[in-house]
Amino acid sequence: MSVTTTNRDSMLEKEDLGPADEKLLDMLNEGRVTAPYVAEETGYSLQYVRDRLGRLVEHGNARKVYEGLYELIDDPRKDVDS
């Protein structure tokens, strides 16, 4: 069993996101996703989607709910400095 660690101190910021991250976050805002589903819907390669999901998990923006199933924790596009 693998353990996923998060680096909450370095959550991604809006300026850290690329076009693939934007699409991925849009889909995660609609609900849980799998990498194959995102790859099919966006046209990005499965490995690239897995890499991007891993990056979101690593930075605490998403979490792996079950093997291959991800959900959004914090959308960095919605963070607003007061």
Image (tube, rainbow, N blue to C red):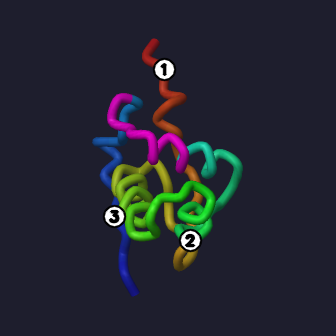
Q: Which residue is mark 2?
A: 36
Q: Residue at x 42, y 66 (%)?
A: 50
Relative to 18, residue 57 above or below = below
Q: Circle 1 is placed at which residue position?
A: 80
Image quarter in which the N terminus is found: bottom left
Q: Pick whichever of labels 2 and 3 is earlier in the sequence.
A: 3
Query: Contact (CB < 8 A) between labels 2 and 1?
Result: no
Amino acid under disc 1: Val
Which class describes the residues within 10 Å of circle 1: few (<14), some (14-19), or many (20+)? few
Q: Is residue 22 inside the magenta stretch?
A: yes
Q: Is residue 25 left or right of residue 53?
A: right
Amino acid at dot 3: Thr
Instruction: Quote the CA–CA distance across marks 2 and 1.
Output: 32 Å
| Residue at position x 39%, y 62% in the image | 48
Front-most of 68 and 50?
Answer: 50
Mainly helix, strand or loop, the magenta region? helix
**Residue that lies at the very extreme toward the bottom in this rendered image:** 1
User: Is residue 6 depicted above or below 77 in this figure?
Assistant: below
Q: What amino acid is found at the position of numbered circle 2 in the picture?
A: Pro
Measured as percent of width and height from the top left, residue 65 is found at: 57, 69
Asked which secondary structure carries label 3, the reply is loop
